Image (cartoon, grey):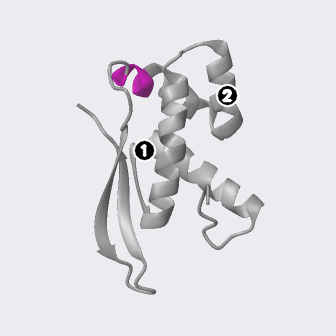
Amino acid sequence: MGYRKLGRNTGHRKAMLRNLVTSLFRDDRIETTETRAKEVSRIAEKLITVAKENNLAARRHCLAYIYEETVVRKLFDNIAPEYTERPGGYTRIIKTGLRKGDAAPLAILELITE
C-alpha cells in the first residue's frame, strides 16, 4: 500500500491534501487528525527537498501542487534555505489527544525550526 485513502474519493483526497500542505507552509503548523498529518508530512518533506534545489523546474513543480503563489514564494525564500544542511526530517508530528465529537486522534504537524 503506497498511500492512505482517508475515506475519500481520489479528487477529494488530493484537494484536501493540497489544502493541508498549503496551510502548513503558510502557517508553519496545522492541527488535524493523526493519519492526515502523516500523509501531509510525506508530501511536505518531498516538496521541501525539491525546493532546496532552487531552480525554475523546482519552482514550477511546487507551483503545480501548492495552491497559492505567495506560499510557494515563502517556501523558496524562507523555508527551504533553513534546511540546506539537513538531509530530511523537516516536519514534526505531536499527538494532542482525541477529538471530542468522534474520538479521532488529533495531532499538530509543524515545521521544525532550529
Residue at image position (63%, 58%) is 16
Say whether residue 111 is left or right of residue 46. left
Question: Of 88 and 71, which appears nearest the observer?
Answer: 88
> What is the secondary structure assignment of the residue under circle 1?
helix
Q: Quadrant of residue 11?
A: bottom right
Disc 1 or disc 2, which is closer to the eye? 2
- Which residue does the numbered mark 2 point to in the structure image? 61
Q: Nearer the viewer, residue 101 or 37?
A: 37
Residue type (three-letter) at the residue carrying disc 1: Asp
Can you give x and y, in whole percent of width and height, for residue 72 in the image?
A: 57, 30
Kindly indicate whether the residue at mark 2 contacts the one at mark 1 (C-beta within 8 angstroms): no
Q: Is residue 88 left or right of 35 when viewed as pictured?
A: left
**Residue extending furthest front?**
1
Q: Quadrant of residue 4?
A: bottom right
Please state the horizontal and vertical placement of residue 44, each as a whole percent of the image: 50, 41
Magenta residues (range): 78-83
Residue 53 visible: yes
Q: Quadrant of the C terminus?
A: top left
The residue that disc 1 covers is: 27
Could you say which quadrant of the image residue 13 lies in?
Answer: bottom right
Kind of residue sitting beneath label 2: His
As drawn, the residue found furthest toward the top would be 55
